[in-house]
Image: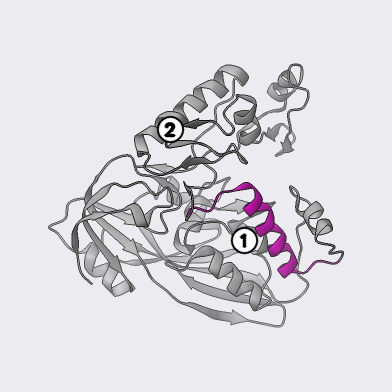
Amino acid sequence: MHIQENISLKPFNTFGIDVRADHFVSVNSVEELKSVLSLQNYTNKLILGGGSNMLLTKDVNALVIHVNLKGIEVFNENEHEVYVKANAGENWHEFVLWCINNNYGGVENLSLIPGNVGTAPIQNIGAYGVELKDVFHSCEAITVENSSIVNFTNDDCNFGYRNSIFKQQAKGKYIITSVTFKLRKTNHQLNINYGTIASQLKAMQIGSPTIQDISKAVIAIRESKLPNPKEIGNSGSFFKNPVISKTAFNKLLANFEDIPSYPVSDTEVKIPAGWLIEKAGFKGKRFGDFGVHKNQALVLVNYGNAKGEDILKLSKLIQNTVNRLFNINIEAEVNII
């Protein structure tokens, strides 16, 4: 364990924003993490996982702690179910592929989501009709204040749409070190009715899909819409899909007959933020070194040497325009730092 000074964080965030950290350390075990947290001569500390859900807008005047805990193990199992424990530093997509290769079902719809296992519960990541909470059993976390270990159950986490206790009352108080998932070994419950999965499977000439087939379909769909962060800097979906009342939706239908929606409850519907942004004229729009991706309006991109504050200004312009046109507020999904 070595604390470095004046380190560029460009390799550690998927937007590829080149800001610098006063101090930086990568921890590879829970004991190392405890030791770093106990250091008294660093007043400010910033926890960094896969760097996939953040926009860095300035240099970081803090000790950046990169959580790099590795390891996957079967925690418990029976004839039909398996409990898999993955450490926080494991790459999320690689973990999904590990599960699929072992025929453990439940996470296949979450293929190719950027980031690490440890940050997945914070955001309650989701895609194509599945959310993390659907397969989450529990997680272990270190209390920042005193380095004690705490276990959170599914109920403890208060999961919501792109939300959890770790983004609300527990924000900044804990560091997730491992996550345990409850997955299926048999009778896989396939979810193919969301988005274009069914049509993609048909295009692949697959009539009776397996979890492997669904993963391949999701990967194909995502690759056709979303830029690879290794090629074009981005953080995936920048905005949440807004939830509005059915009354407000019916008013919008009068002027926008093609507005899509998904039912949330008897009184609310979810509107695709990408559709709103595209209708507002931003899809594919470029402003020098940054802009909105040509294939997916939800994705803001860094084409090379953009600054975080430039992308932040663009996000605010998009929010204000969508609000003016549709009277809908769209919230940023990424963390602004």
Q: Position of residue 20 (x, y in %)?
A: 25, 49
Please name which of the two marks, 2 or 1, marks the residue nearer to the observer: 2
Considering the numbered disc 1 on the image, is that residue within a helix, a strand or a loop?
A: loop
What amino acid type is highlighted by mark number 1? Ser
Question: On screen, 179 above or below 52?
Answer: below
Classify residue 82 by image quadrant: bottom right
Which of 40 and 94 lies nearest the eye of the viewer? 94
Residue 127 is inside the magenta segment: no
Q: Position of residue 195 (x, y in %)?
A: 74, 47
Where does the N terminus fall, quadrant-wise?
bottom left
Name the residue that disc number 2 marks: 288
User: Is residue 144 visible in the rendered structure shown here?
Assistant: no
Q: Are marks 2 and 1 in contact (CB under 8 Å)?
A: no
Q: Which residues are magenta?
A: 208-229
User: What kind of secondary structure does the magenta stretch mostly adopt?
Assistant: helix
- Residue 279: mark: none
Question: On screen, 212 above or below 112?
Answer: below
Residue 225 is inside the magenta segment: yes
Considering the numbered disc 2 on the image, is that residue within a helix, a strand or a loop?
A: loop
- Residue at 52 percent of width and 46 percent of height: 163
Q: Distance between the Cα atoms at labels 2 and 1? A: 31 Å
